[in-house]
Structures are given as C-alpha cells and as structure tokens.
Amino acid sequence: MARYAIHIYCDECSAPHPMGVSVVLNDGPPELASVAEHYAGKTVPGTLNLMLRNCAKCPKTGKMFQQWDSKKIFIAPVAG
C-alpha cells in the first residue's frame, strides 16, 4: 500500500492544483497518472472515489471549483 496525492485541473486558469489531501491505495500508479488512465476498465477504489468529489480552491483565481472529468484528476505517489 502506498500514499497518493490528488491533483485536479482547473478549467478556469488552465493549471493543475494539489487538493491538499492524500489517499492510501493498493494498486496506484508508479508515477503521476490521471484517474481515467490508471483505472481504465477497472473500478475506482471507494476511498479515492469519495476524495474525488471534494472541492478545491484555485490559488490563481481564489474561486472554489470541482472537477468531474476523471481525465483531469491526477494521482501521484507521495515520497516517503
């Protein structure tokens, strides 16, 4: 099991932002990957699925946003 940070792409400022949360996964990718890419044809684990519905604040616009497109939601292994 490894810990993964969640990053989401902001459509308004066109940049990815860390959500500031992480999740422990059994079958996460070895490097940054979109949820759509890594879980293509597989079921997204429940804990990750819950985290994906959280809102984030864009540091550039100051606005809260939510990303529903799993191609624009990324998971990356956390060092350590």
Image (cartoon, grey):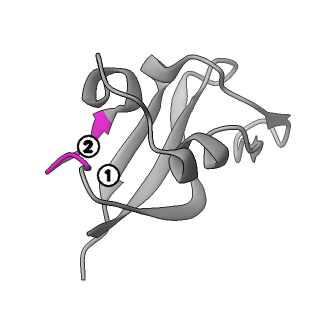
Q: In this view, does 26 lie to the left or right of 12?
A: left
Question: Residue 62 — which label?
Answer: none
Which label sits on residue 76?
A: 1
Query: What residue span does the magenta drawing correspond to?
Result: 28-33
- Residue located 31% across and 28% down the image: 39
Between discs 1 and 2, the one toward the N terminus: 2
Q: In which quarter of the image is residue 79?
A: bottom left
Q: Where is residue 19 in the image (x, y as percent from the top left)?
A: 61, 53
- The residue depicted at 63 percent of the width and 49 percent of the height is 51
Please tell me in which quadrant of the rendered image residue 38 appears.
Answer: top left
Which one is nearer the viewer's eye here, 71 or 60?
71
Residue 7: x percent and y percent? 49, 44
Provide the secondary structure element on which disc 1 rests: strand
Residue shown at the point (52%, 30%) measured from the top left: 15
Kind of residue indicated by mark 1:
Ala
Please state, as top left, top right, bottom left or bottom right, where the N terminus lies in the image: bottom left
Callout 2: SS? loop
Residue for badge 2: 32
Rendered-image quadrant of the C terminus: bottom left
Q: How many marks?
A: 2
